[in-house]
Structures are given as structure tokens and as C-alpha cells.
Image (cartoon, rainbow, N blue to C red):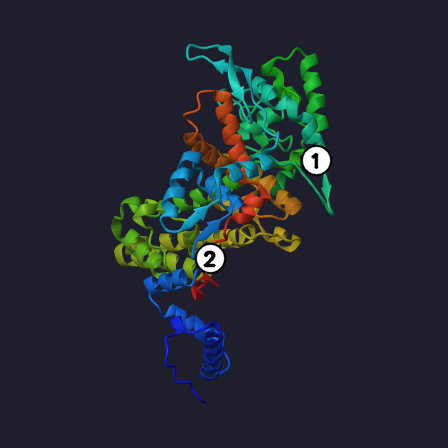
Amino acid sequence: MHVTNAHNPTTTVCTRTLKSRCSELQDIRRIVSGGEPSALLQSEVLSLSDEERKSLLKEAGISDEIKIGPAEVLAIKVGLAIPWNKIRLLRRWLMASNVSLACEERMRHVSKRIVDDNIQGELAPFSFTLTSGGEELRAAPLVFIPTEAGDSFANLHIALDRYKEQCIKSNEITCRQYTLKVFLSGDYEFLSKFYGLSGASGAHPCPFCLIANAEMATPLIERGHAPPRTLDGIEEQYLFYLVSGSVRKQAQHFYNCIFEPIFNIPLEQQSAERAKSVEQLEAKIAASTRAVKKGYLFNEGPFVKELDKALQGFGVHRQQYFGGAFVGNHVHAALKVSNINKLLTSILCAARANLPHKAEMVENETVKFLNVFTLFAKCHAIYDNNFIDETNVEKLGIPELLPYCIPGATIPIKMHMLEDHATEWVRLTHVGFGLLGEQGAESIHAKFNSLGRAYTAIPDRVERLKCIMKEHLVSIAPDMVAAIPPPKKRKKSLDDT
């Protein structure tokens, strides 16, 4: 391979000579790199220091400025819930590092195109409960929810009646082969008021069926499913209630239907507190575990030490920044069959070493816990999936699990919903309990609170809420969601499989 011996520096030669040298250098790089000159060139550039690389680009007339478009900057703004003045400050900081953000005018144009005229706001008369007793009507801002007034029957009607027609139309929208379904999400008190029911104190408290309060203690296998509630049935019983004189004490004779439903959303399209019931079930299991020994929460006693050793053996450390509590990953690990056996074996070993006269009793108790943990592990593995087919619905076995957790105890309304209605609802929707509870909707409150802190300086209450809602609407727009980079997927270890 012949290499030309240069007599003059490259910066002083003519264009023809410069092209000849570049061509010769490319030939050399192709031979030396084994046919991959681009890879070798990249390695040469990366071998330079940051200062040398910047100087090289500057001398070559190539700008290393990073430009971020208006949609991406707007996604940053709404994703971090920061106001415009913080974006201006961020722009000055990034300019010092040669990062250029799109101008504010273009960002506001994108935001206006997304929001359009979809946000309306006004002062509306809401009912407020006085500390001295009684109620009074006061004007409060209404943009998306009655933020200052309580969720009384009257306030819900004032806030939501105007959307009744939109709700009916939304329930009929079809896109490709799919039909849009409006799901109602909220806690038990809100759902009861929404459908015109008197609530948990009534003789028929369930929003899904007509079961009497006294019948809930009877196992499902013995009593069978009660007749389901329907919208027509609620309206019919409400009319009977009106004709009888609207006496609250007589509401039990009309299945506790004391108002008509606000929207005609089918009762199977409501996200009740089934998921919260599962959390309560987990809490009861954890409480039963703590009952095996005294002082578990304070890391005292031989049982606790053995349990901690067993937990740490499969990666559950109960860190202090979690308050020493279990988190989601801990539950996944603890509900593996091999780990369940390790936990129960540790308790049995501690009993034999420290309380030999109680070892037989502890052994009998561990059999019960083996059954309940095994049943719960099977249930947890199924409802934790994204899609639940018919075969897995039949395997849920929630009614089998309940007698272990609350033997002989009264059945609260949430446990009744878990026993009677959770399985049927999973069969209808084919999704796990994580999407069937109100936690997803409740998490929006945290978003609104974060946005509200950014707009506290706006004196007009209606305008302030409109700004919050505009920001929220922009943040959930498909273009904004698509602009958020996805998190890097973590490689699964052998213990996770």
C-alpha cells in the first residue's frame, strides 16, 4: 500500500490536493478497518476528548447545538407540572450548555390547538355544610368537579347533570371494531350517591345486587347469588319510594333507592372498591401473620428474627425508607411456593427451639397458613396479569380464600363485593384488579394538586381551575404522551422468572 509523503500542511493546500488526500485516507481506512471504515472513523472521533471534539466541530463549521421542538418542550412542561416562568428559567440554563428550546409562542400554539374550546368554567351555586349545623348555598367554581363543595346528592346533580347527554352519546361511539364504554370510578360512598342509594347503613347496601345486610354472613355456596340491581329497577323503586312519602326510615322496603341515578351508566360499568377489598384481604393475612408472635413490628423475639432471616434469604429486606413495610416486589417474592415453605418452616423451627410445649399447636397453625398463602398466591398470580382468560377466571377461587381470613366474623360490604361480584366482573372485563379499582382515578387528585400549586398566584378561582384543567388535558393528549421517552426495560434476573 503506497502512502503519499506530504510536503505541505493540509490547511495550505488547494481543493484538488485536499480531495486527493481525503480519498487516499479513505482507502487506507477501508484496508485497516477490514472493510468497515465508518466504524473506524467513529472510534477515532470517540477517542478524542470532549474539548477536542467540540473544537474539531467548531473549526469544521458544524454546529453541535441541540434543538428541542415545541411539542417535546410542552411535554416536559406538563409532565413535570411546571409553570411558564420555570420553562423560561430552564431555557436560560440549557442555553449555557448549547441546548436550544422552542420559543414560547410556538409552544402556546400547540397547547391551544390541543385544548381548543373544550374547557368551560363558571361560578355555580353549591350546598355547603356549616360547622354549626345546617347547610347554605354559596357560589363556587365549577370547571371539572365541585372542588370546594362536598359530594352531596344536590352538588353532584349541579355538577354532572349538564353532561348527561354527552355520556349517553359517548357510550355509543364505535372506533374500528371497538365500542367505547364509559366506566364510572369512585369510592363506595360516591357510587351509592351516584346511583341514588342510601349507602352502607341501609338494609340493602350493595350497589350491584339486592342482597340484604343480614344475608352477607352466609357463605355464597349456601345462599347463592342475589338478584342483580338494574337501572330500571332503581328508577322503579325510587318512584315507589316517592309515592310512599319519601320517608328515609322506610327506604329498606324499596331496596334503599331514595334518588334516581344521575347518569344511565350500566351498573356493571362501575369501578368499585373491589381492588381495595383485595388490599384489605392482604392486610388481614398480614395481621394474622403478625398474630403468631408478639412484637413483630418492633423486631423483637425469636419468631421475628427467624422470619426476618427467611425474608432476607429471598431478597425481602423491608427497607427503612418504606417504613419497614412490604412493597409490591416483596409480595411477588413472598408468594412463591418455595418461599412460602421457607417462611412457615422458620416459624416452626423457632417454636421447636423456644417453645417446645407449643410446637404441636404452631405446626397445626402453619398448615392453615400454608393453605391460605397457597390459595392467595394462586389468586394473586392470576389477577396480577394484564389479560385474564376464561380458564383463569374459574381458577381465581376468591370464595375459597375468604373463610381462612375471616372465620366466624361479620362480612362487611366490601368483602361481600369481593366474594360475590369480583369474579363476575373479571369475567366481563378480562383485566386484573389493578384496573378495576378507583386507585387510578384517585391518582389524578395528586396530579391536580401538583398543578394547583403552580397556579396558586391566579386570583380568579374559575380561571385558576381552567388553567389546571387545560394543563391536564394537554398532558393526556396522545401527541404529548407519545413524546415522553419510555423507561429503559430492566433485565430480569433468574429470581424474577
**Residue 280 visible in the displayed image:** no
Residue 249 at x, y = what percent?
58, 15
Is residue 458 or residue 287 the one in the foreground?
Answer: 458
Q: Residue at x 45, y 73 (%)?
A: 14
Q: Amino acid at mark 1?
A: Asn
**Residue 244 visible in the displayed image:** yes
On screen, residue 155 above or below 4 = above
For the N terminus, the quadrant is bottom left
On screen, residue 274 above or below 13 = above
Residue 184 at x, y = what percent?
61, 34
Q: How far is disc 1 from disc 2 in space, using C-alphas?
A: 36 Å
Residue 328 at x, y = what percent?
44, 50
Q: Amino acid at mark 2?
A: Lys
Mark 2 Cα-neighbour bin, 10 Å: few <14, some 14–19, many ≥20: few
On screen, residue 291 above or below 27 = above
N-terminal label among 1 and 2 = 1
Residue 10 - label? none
Can you identify the residue that label 1 sits on?
171
Residue 175 at x, y = what percent?
72, 44
Quick one: SS at disc 1? Answer: loop
Q: Where, by quadrant of the figure, is residue 232 drawn? A: top right
Quick one: SS at disc 2? Answer: loop
The nearer-to-camera label among 1 and 2 is 2
Residue 488 - label? 2
Mark 1 Cα-neighbour bin, 10 Å: few <14, some 14–19, many ≥20: some
444 vs 456, left or right, is: right
Q: Residue at x 39, y 47 (%)?
A: 95
Q: Residue at x 40, y 37 (%)?
A: 86
